Image (spheres, grey):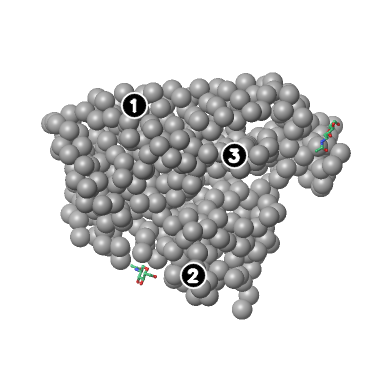
Amino acid sequence: MQPSITLLALFPLLGSISASPLKARQEVIGVSSPGAEAVSATATESGVTASSSAADASATSVAESSGASDTSASASSTDSSAVAAATAGSTADTSNDLTVVKFAALAESLEKTFYETALSRFDAQAFTDAGFVDGQGIFDQLQVIATDEATHLTVLQSVAQSLGGSTSDVDSCTFNFDSALADVKTFLATARVLEFVGIDAYIGGTTLIGDKSLMVSAAEITTVEARHNTVLNTLNGGSSVPNAFDMILTPQQVLSVAAPFVSGGCDPVAALGLTPTPALTITNTDVPQPGTLLTFGGAGLDGKDQAGLFCNMIVGGATESINLPIAECKVPDGLDGTVHLFITSSSTPLSSNIVNQNATAIVAGPAIAFIDTIANPQSQLLLGTNINSNAAATNGSSGTGKKKIVITQTIVEEDIV
Ligand SMILES: *[C@@H]1O[C@H](CO)[C@@H](O)[C@H](O)[C@H]1NC(C)=O
Ligand SMILES: *[C@@H]1O[C@H](CO)[C@@H](O)[C@H](O)[C@H]1NC(C)=O
């Protein structure tokens, strides 16, 4: 059996992209369109199908995939009546709106605390020492991002109040970022993950929102999270805008990535009535590149016989995952940018669209990987001669230099021509 997928083999996959994202986007948008009530959800094994409307289907999905106790379920339906009262006159199902606001508040609180902790630990000099030409400029840029996250959180707290609720049961969460803030390089790599997951959180959340004005507010934040992600892509030496399409996670999948940072003070599962999907981690010590055989760990795989499991790589724009036996999970040539990884029990590729995804096939995930294969000239400007796609913090002289040399030559040639 030949597990590796060459660039050539990817072409059919990439070729199918041009037709599919529009359809995929219509399906997502269908949830939020005025005709949402009339849209039928696509049948899936997870039992989402029985609903008469796409919005209801999402709600059903939350309830069914939630392991929350009856207690938290009834607490959340109490909240729902408050939401319904607050949005009287709307025919949309707004019963999940407060949950989504609280979920977003948890994500923003995590990001805010992450940046504040990082910027109290790393000063401008630390960024200069890590190889950036203008350490102060990088510090200031990250400070702006931290302020954005704090502002988002404050606004979400007010929105929860306007819905007759509160974010207090997620505001109390405390976080531990010790391993994520071991050094500047790890900080920036983790920030890149959190910003991408921030986009996931807002768009995934909109599949549950009923109130259209809340959807607009969510969109206004989503685009800013995407700008943050672009900055972090560049600071990590990756493509600023690697793909024409992003991939979206469900709220349960976002929680799977976020929950390990929660160190106490709250019970996100009870507060949100959402159960995280089982955690997945990539155990490779080197940064994954095309050709890397990925290896996995994490709570979702604990005690599981990995024979018979499959790895699924979801990349921007593809309608479904690249599905490989877990022991043959090699990063294909031709990938650049963010990859969402899932382990499934099925050799059927996972749908990229969370509305149609077969949730029952997912054993663990997501894990997030960044495959940086295309050198970014903007990164070189920030990192000077220290450019090294997978090592933002590498010292100039100790960098591997391969990409550095290629990029420098390209720029010089362009200048001359
Ligand atoms: C979903 O995945 C499960 C587990 O692999 C499988 O049994 C089922 O047939 C799948 N459903 C669909 C609709 O593909
Ligand atoms: C990076 O370079 C600086 C100055 O050239 C040096 O003091 C420092 O020890 C280097 N750090 C590493 C990790 O090599």
Image location of residue 409, percent across then percent down: 83, 39
Q: Which residue is at 66% across, 28% downward? A: 122
Of tags 2 and 3, the one toward the viewer is 3
Q: Which residue is mark 1?
A: 157
Q: Amino acid at mark 2?
A: Lys
Q: Which residue is at 34% across, 26% downward? A: 157
Q: Would you place residue 403 above or below residue 235 in this image?
A: below
For this view, does 269 lie left or right of residue 254? left
Q: Amino acid at mark 3?
A: Asp
The C terminus: image quadrant: top right
Q: Would you place residue 340 above or below residue 198 in this image?
A: below
For this view, does 118 lie left or right of residue 267? right
Q: Which one is earlier in the sequence, the residue at label 2 or at label 3?
A: 3
Q: Which residue is at 25% across, 49% downward? A: 59
C-alpha gap between disc 2 and disc 3 = 28 Å
Q: Which residue is mark 2?
A: 304
Q: Would you place residue 297 above or below residue 207 in this image?
A: below
Of residues 237 and 34, the one drawn nearer to the viewer in this rendering? 237
Q: Which one is earlier in the sequence, the residue at label 2 or at label 1?
A: 1
The N terminus: image quadrant: bottom right
Q: Amino acid at mark 1?
A: Gln
Q: Which residue is mark 3?
A: 178
